[in-house]
Amino acid sequence: MSNKASSRPEPVAQEHVPLKARNVAFDWAGTPLHWVPGDPSTTHTINVLHLLLPAGERWFVHVYKQALPLIRDARLREDVIGFIGQEAMHSQAHDGVLPHLRAQGLDPEPYTAQIDWFFEKLLGDRTLPPGRARAWWLRERIALIAAIEHYTAFLGDWVLNAEALDAKGADPVMLDLLRWHGAEEVEHRSVAYELFLHVDGGYRRRARTWALAFGALVFLWQRGIRFFMENDPTLRDGKASAKDFWRGGREGVLPEPVAILRSAPQYLSPSYHPSHYGSTAQAAAYLARSPAAVAAEAGSPGGA
């Protein structure tokens, strides 16, 4: 497929906003282990984010710092710098949940050590000669991040609209973390794809790295759910099950599996652009009332 600009879909202009990192903080003292009351399966399915995201988003930042010298467009460079700041803050915020889990008898380190290996070793820097091989590996990782960001934006849009979590009495501090993060994912949802288009944009690479990213996310997520359910000290013979995931989708406390599957042809469509999915206005409206984001804006970070 041609990589000429004329063959690329146009972004939605009003969906672009300047990006800034918000120095949020959250107080977990009152958050129970099963923060979705009576639903450990849903709780731990979403808790996998706290295992995957700190290492993953540190990796995003590391790769994008290497990509900065390749950027020839001033606005895109500014967006990437804003993206780096937001992703670094996301990593820190989710990392902050891990001591709380540990204090409640669920030590995440055996699993987080595997995630660290995945991002730092398997997807980390390689000893490659300068030139084409090194450039190929950098572009490959930029394309992987664009595919992953398609799903983080999907999840961000989902959690902003997941009223079933409120109806079920989910912990407000955890919901604020998830929705603050989700809103920023919607806010910057086009950056990773625009960077991919800027440095490469090839369709075969887009499709190949989507398959790798989707397969890795499914594999790591189901392993994380199993880890949480099997190691939850309050559960007897805790087990993860596909039935619970489908049930959560029907109830609206988890994304619907069918919606997840429908997101694949969206990304693989030649007319795809992230700005066509999700609402920056909705994200901005949540960030304007998020307890953590409001406190950060006032200069006194603190959770709900």
Image (cartoon, helix red, strand yellow):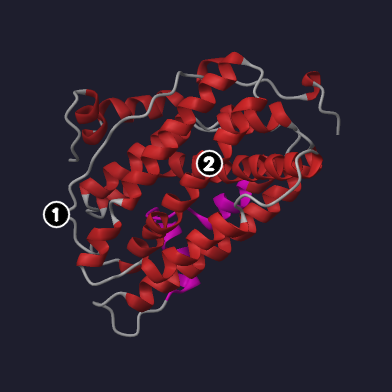
The secondary structure that dominates the magenta segment is helix
Position of residue 66 measured from the top left corner of the image (x, y, whole percent): 60, 35
Q: Which mark is residue 62?
A: 2
Residue 16 in sight in this render: yes
Position of residue 137 measured from the top left corner of the image (x, y, whole percent): 71, 45
Identify the residue shown where x is 53% and y is 41%: 62
Position of residue 61 measured from the top left corner of the image (x, y, whole percent): 50, 39
Q: Which mark is residue 106?
A: none
| Left or right: where 182 falls relative to 15 | left
Q: Residues within 10 Å of mark 2 (few under 14, many from 20)?
A: some
Q: What amino acid type should be assigned to the residue bearing mark 1? A: Ala
Q: Residues within 10 Å of mark 1 (few under 14, many from 20)?
A: few
Identify the residue shown where x is 28% and y is 25%: 288
Mark 2 or 1, closer to the camera: 2
Q: Which mark is residue 29?
A: 1
User: What span is in magenta?
Assistant: 240-263
Distance in Å between CA atoms under marks 2 and 1: 32 Å
- Is 55 in the magenta? no
The residue sitting at the bottom extreme is 237
**Picture quadrant where residue 110 is located:** bottom left
**Picture quadrant where residue 177 is located:** top left
Does residue 246 lie above or below 27 as drawn?
Answer: below
Mark 2 lies on a secondary structure that is helix
- Is 256 in the magenta? yes
In this view of the protein, which residue sits in the foreground, 74 or 160? 74
